[in-house]
Amino acid sequence: MNFDLGQIAQVLDHVPYPIGKSHLVQFAQQQGTNEQIMGMLEHLPDKTFNSSQEVKDALGGFGSLGNLGGFKF
C-alpha cells in the first residue's frame, strides 16, 4: 500500500480537537487527503477524538489495513 505517513500526521496535527469521526473525515477530505488515507479514517470508531494522538493510536490498531500498526508516528 502506498501512503504517506507524514501526510497523515500533518492532517491530524491541524485538526480542531475535539472532533467526531464524521467531522474528522470531512476535514481530511477538505485538506486533499489521498483516497487510501481517507479509507483508513473512514474505518475509525464512531467516537469523539480529543487529540491527534488518539486518532494515531486508533489508526495504529489497523494492522490489517496496510500494516499501519507497525509504524510509529
Image (spheres, rainbow, N blue to C red):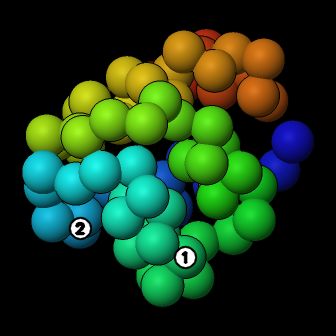
**Dot 1 corresponds to which residue?**
29
Label 1 element class: helix
In the picture, which quadrant includes the N terminus?
Answer: top right
**What residue is shown at x 29% (from left), y 51% (from top)?**
20
**What residue is shown at x 32% (from left), y 35% (from top)?**
47
Q: Where is residue 6 shown, x and y percent of the image?
A: 48, 54
Q: Where is residue 9 shown, x and y percent of the image?
A: 39, 51
Crowding around mark 2 (Cα neighbors within 10 Å: few <14, some 14 to 19, many 20+) is few
Q: Where is residue 34 shown, x and y percent of the image?
A: 69, 69
**Dot 2 corresponds to which residue?**
14
Asked if the residues shown at circle 1 and circle 2 are in contact, with their CB atoms under 8 angstroms apart, the answer is: no
Question: Does 28 sit left or right of 36 as displayed?
Answer: left
Crowding around mark 1 (Cα neighbors within 10 Å: few <14, some 14 to 19, many 20+) is some
Query: Residue 45, labelled with which disc?
Result: none
**What residue is shown at x 13% (from left), y 40% (from top)?**
50
Label located before the other in sequence (1 or 2): 2
Q: Quadrant of residue 14?
A: bottom left
Q: Where is residue 62 shown, x and y percent of the image?
A: 63, 21
> How many circles with numbers are drawn on the protein?
2
Question: Does 63 sit left or right of 44 as displayed?
Answer: right
Q: Amino acid at mark 2?
A: His
